[in-house]
Amino acid sequence: MGATRRSFEAGHRPKFLVIVDDTPECSRAIRFAARRCARTGANLVMLAIVDPPDNFEWLGVGEALRAEAEEEAAGRLEEAASLATAASPGLEPERLIRVGEKDESILHLIEEDQDISFLVLASGVGSSGPGPLVSSIAGRMSGTFPVPIVIVPGDLADEAIDALAG
């Protein structure tokens, strides 16, 4: 985890990482990250994480469930990429799908891609708390996390995000 980021070395560019899921606040993180990327010349990485199927090895059910989940994740990534390019025309986000536990998948990607400089999350809205990713990553691991975590308030309007992100 302690590897030095390479995002500002020759031949590298910083990347903002956004986790794409089906939470309502996800669009806030996407917009913020897309606007920051456009403002700073960084790249945007969008990651969708698929839960591994339970042990359904009987007649290939596990593989079918996994393929279906990956197809749904790919659809979410396409919608998210559309939101990002609408917020920052010309931006072409990198789209990734991983199968595994969310926290582990995020950490492994950050370990693999030394250009990832920021993780952008949005907090939950309403009385349900800060949201599952903010709770697990920013809450439990913030002191040992390998990159800064940007938490966007989940109820910010587009205009407010644009004013903050550039």
Image (cartoon, helix red, strand yellow):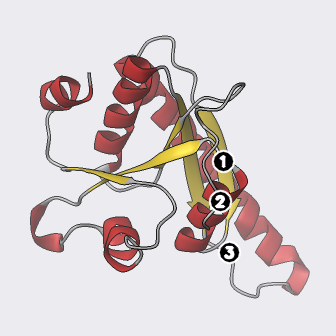
Residue ID at (57%, 45%): 116
Answer few, some or many: residues within 10 Å of disc 1's Cα (few below 14, many 20 plus, some between 14 and 19). some
Residues under numbered marks 1 and 2 in contact, where contact means CB atoms less than 8 Å apart: yes
Residue ID at (51%, 27%): 42
Which amino acid does the dot numbered 3 rest on?
Answer: Pro
Judging by the rendered image, the residue that carries numbered circle 2 is 3
Label annotation for residue 114:
1
Judging by the rendered image, the residue that carries numbered circle 3 is 52
Residue 35 drawn above or below residue 4: above
Answer few, some or many: residues within 10 Å of disc 3's Cα (few below 14, many 20 plus, some between 14 and 19). some
Residue 34 appears at what percent x and percent y? 41, 29
Task: Point out the tag, 1 or 3, that comes first from the N-terminus.
Answer: 3
Label annotation for residue 104:
none
SS of the residue at dot 2? loop
Q: Quadrant of the N terminus?
A: bottom right
Which residue, as the protein is rendered here, is positioned at the far right?
59
Residue 45 appears at what percent x and percent y? 57, 39
Residue ID at (42%, 22%): 40
* In this view, the mark in front (1 or 3): 1
Residue 137, image quadrant: bottom left
Q: Nearer the viewer, residue 98 or 166?
A: 166
Residue 57 drawn above or below residue 162: below
SS of the residue at dot 1? loop
Q: How many marks?
A: 3
Task: Point out the tag, 2 or 3, that comes first from the N-terminus.
Answer: 2
Could you give the CA–CA distance between mark 1 and mark 3, rounded to whole angstroms? 25 Å
SS of the residue at dot 3? loop
